[in-house]
Image (spheres, rainbow, N blue to C red):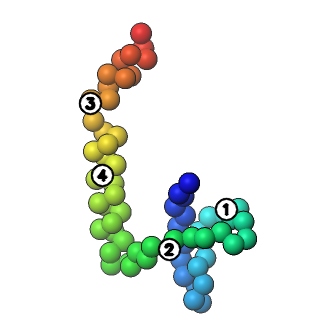
Amino acid sequence: MLKTIWATIRQGKIELLESTELPEGTKVLVTLLLDDEAGFWLEASQKSLDVVWDNTEDDVYAQLLQT
C-alpha cells in the first residue's frame, strides 16, 4: 500500500508533519518538492484530480443509487 505523508527537512533529518505508526525498518521513498516547484506540482495534481472527480459522466451512478 502506498501512502503519502508530508514532511520537512530539519537539521539534515526528515521530520514528518503528521504522526503515523511506522514499524522499525520500514522502507520509504522520498520525493523532493523544491519550494519553487511545489506550487506547480500541486496545481498539476489538482487539475488531474478535477478531471477524474468533477465530471458529469459519473452522475449516472448517483441516479442509479436514488432508484
Screen quadrant of the N terminus: bottom right
Numbered tag placed on residue 20 in the rendering: 1
The residue at the point 37 percent across, 23 percent down is 61
Vertical position of residue 4 compared to residue 51: above or below: below
Judged from this view, the residue extending furthest toward the top is 67
The secondary element bearing badge 1 is classed as loop
Numbered tag placed on residue 28 in the rendering: none
Q: Earlier in the sequence, mark 2 or mark 4?
A: 2
Q: Earlier in the sequence, mark 1 or mark 4?
A: 1
Q: CA distance from mark 3 to mark 4?
A: 15 Å
What type is the residue that disc 1 sits on?
Answer: Thr
- Residue position for label 4: 48
Judged from this view, the residue extending furthest toward the right is 24
The residue at the point 45 percent across, 73 percent down is 31
Q: CA distance from mark 2 to mark 4?
A: 22 Å
Mark 3 and mark 4 residues within 8 Å of each other at the beta carbon: no
- Residue 41 in the image: state x and y as whole percent: 33, 66
Q: CA distance from mark 1 to mark 4?
A: 27 Å
Numbered tag placed on residue 30 in the rendering: 2
Vertical position of residue 38 compared to residue 4: above or below: below
Q: CA distance from mark 1 to mark 2?
A: 16 Å
Q: Earlier in the sequence, mark 1 or mark 2?
A: 1
The residue at the point 33 percent across, 54 percent down is 46
Q: Earlier in the sequence, mark 3 or mark 1?
A: 1
Q: Is residue 50 left or right of residue 13?
A: left
What type is the residue that disc 3 sits on?
Answer: Thr
What type is the residue that disc 2 sits on?
Answer: Val
